[in-house]
Image (tube, helix red, strand yellow):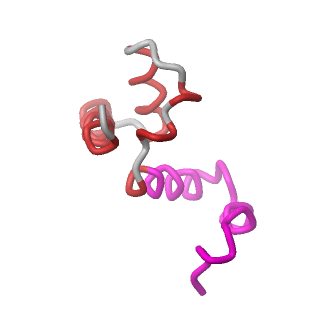
Amino acid sequence: MNSKEFSLKIEAIVKEKRIPYMDAVIDYCKINDIDVGTINSMVNKSLKEKIKHEAINLKTVSYTHLRAHEPVLDLVC
């Protein structure tokens, strides 16, 4: 499965179950017996951004904390 297919499956779960993206990823992995630690290559940039924004909005992680871990070249002011 490529990252686009994975992203589409996660989008479908989010819409169907009305759950956050991170929960959908975990749910998909659990149902399909996939170790969550092995899916990094399947999570495309768009899905990562959606998870990141949800985490910030849910106050799971602070925006400042995320910015501190971005490579200098990725910072946009």
Q: Residue 29 location, x and y as percent?
A: 44, 22
Up-down: is 56 above or below 12?
below
Q: Quadrant of residue 3?
A: top left
For image coordinates 41% across by 39% down, the residue present is 42
Q: Which range is magenta?
A: 48-77
For image coordinates 48% across by 33% down, the residue present is 39
For image coordinates 57% across by 51% down, the residue present is 55
User: In this image, 23 relative to 4: left or right?
Assistant: right
User: In this image, 8 relative to 61: left or right?
Assistant: left
Q: Quadrant of residue 5?
A: top left
Nearest the eye: 65 or 40? 40
Look at the image and say whether residue 57 sits in the magenta stretch: yes
Up-down: is 44 above or below 2?
below
Up-down: is 4 above or below 74?
above
Q: Residue 27 location, x and y as percent?
A: 43, 23
Q: Quadrant of the N terminus?
A: top left
Q: Residue 18 location, x and y as percent?
A: 33, 37
Q: Residue 16 location, x and y as percent?
A: 24, 32
Up-down: is 5 above or below 63?
above
Nearest the eye: 70 or 41? 41
